[in-house]
Amino acid sequence: MATKGNPGDNRTNKSSMYLLIIIGLCTFFYVLGLWQHSGFGKGDRIAVEITKQTDCSVLSDLTYETHQDGDAGTLDNSSDAELKEFKPCDDRYIDYTPCHDQTRAMTFPRESMNYRERHCPPQEEKLYCLIAAPRGYATPFPWPQSRDYVPYANAPYKSLTVEKAVQNWIQYEGNVFRFPGGGTQFPQGADAYIDELASVIPFDNGMVRTALDTGCGVASFGAYLFKKNVIAMSIAPRDSHEAQVQFALERGVPAIIGVIGTIMLPFPSGSFDMAHCSRCLIPWGANDGMYMKEVDRVLRPGGYWVLSGPPINWKTNYQAWQRPSDELEEEQRKIEDVAKLLCWEKKHEKGEIAIWQKRANNDECSEDTQSTICQSTTADDVWYKKMENCITPSKGSGLWKPFPERLNAVPSRISSGSVPGVSVEVFEKDNRLWKKHVNAYKRVNKILESGRYRNIMDMNAGLGSFAAALDSPKLWVMNVLPTIAEKTNLGVIFERGLIGIYHDWCEAFSTYPRTYDLIHANGLFSLYKNECSAEDILLEMDRILRPEGAVIFRDQAEVLVKVRRIVKGMRWNTRMVDHEDGPPISEKVLFAVKRYWVAGDNTTSSN
């Protein structure tokens, strides 16, 4: 008779072994997700307080080996000796942003911020190595603590604490950065500033859910908007101020590296409920108001535009701003003229804050407006397209449902038949399917709802139903629509009260390394099989995924076998499981966790 508890005994009951494997898998994900590396100082008082609040026990050994008997689908039986091992990149690439590399940027024209836009390296210049985390890297604090505190080791750049000291952006306190919630235009704090906006903009009834914050700084505006159940897409150029987008994402606030320059923003027309600029230094009146026309394109009918800072109230502030009064007067005149052309109604101007509202449709506008309407019929085909100096026709009536009702309601784009191939029935079926899928994910990764994962990305978002099924104040999802997928779907995602972006996964994403806690990739590698190599995509996923971050792949079994072979050489642990409907389904799910390792460390650790 087999000795009880001896897993190496050949006579161990097979069904018991399967059960142990399943239990072990669930425990593995549960423990990996909650363990917090604190290499910068395990005695830090804030980290200690957060640890006290975490109701879990941490195993001492988190080494995980994939066992053949526990994996579903077709197995890859080749030896580990044949696997390609990816080496760490040089330490100077710790914060490498391939398509926003500073050295490459300086070779492009400075006119209209062209050099700050995306300029990706050619294939022969791509790095085929793993971006290391800085020494002492720590798992970010859970939300809402992360809004106010970021471990210094994760983004060790102090220049903003000096440069913006009087504006209360950021302070350095021991082993952490603290974000007091101040800003250039809200010295009394973001809450007071948002309350002033709320006297005009209906934040509290759910009608304003999505916002675009251009020139976001460290994104305190977006961070505090979460209190109003508003989710902001924050944008700032790479290192205009050092690491501002990196700080935003470390805080748990949606952000991308970007700028309003020569190409169109990577969003569909009529998508955001509000756009915001707080001293963002964008010349809004220049080029016949082309940048305001681009904001108009991405605003939904009835949406709001907020401009605070110069030139608003220039008569009072021109001396403090150290700018000529006639220059500021002309700047504001141009903005007012473009706003009239766009048929925006000024709703408020007080102090340095002005608020306009976009009309419901262009039919109410002047003949001058009609003469500048864009002739293009593909308003959502924006990837690397030059910005046009024309007005995009409004889509829809602007009578969207309030959030959260609109999250699962049939979007007007679908009920009106504007999305080819997507009927009301298709949408509702997709919604039900992803609720089922997400429930299955939660049975394996039991910490999906714990708050351990704040920044989540869906790399092939479809209609946004994965994000809708996950909806929680503890997390947000960046819904990515691949440029080779159906482009009209991203408008549906925004109408649901979610945020998203167009992107081509043959290129790097516009973010810093280590900015996402969980990545979901549904059918992505089947979609891109004839476009670019899986290796390129997986290395980019590794770059943007935090140490100990998780990935969920859903695809055909033979595709996932190839994916797993690649990530075995990337310091990831994996487990393949059957579709929730059982082994006969050819679609499988591959769960993965990126191991913890830092610059100069040739070993990896899970504890």
Image (tube, rainbow, N blue to C red):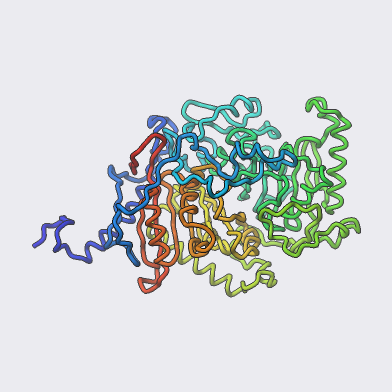
Taking the view exactly as shown, the residue that stands out farthest to the left is 1
Left or right: 297, with 520 as reference point: right
Q: Residue at x 80, y 25 (%)?
A: 322
Report x, y in % for residue 560: 41, 62
Report x, y in % for residue 23: 29, 57
Dividing the picture into quadrants, the one containing residue 270 is bottom right
* Residue 589, above or below 214: below
Report x, y in % for residue 228: 62, 48
Q: Residue at x 50, y 49 (%)?
A: 540
Left or right: 392, with 436 as reference point: right
Taking the view exactly as shown, the residue that stands out farthest to the front is 124
* Residue 200, above or below 565: above
Q: Residue at x 89, y 31 (%)?
A: 326
Left or right: 62, with 311 as reference point: left
Q: How many marks?
A: 0
Q: Is residue 325 visible?
A: yes
Q: Which quarter of the figure is the C terminus placed in? A: top left
Q: Is residue 254 visible?
A: no
Report x, y in % for residue 243: 58, 35
Q: Which quarter of the figure is the N terminus placed in? A: bottom left
* Residue 16, above or below 384: below
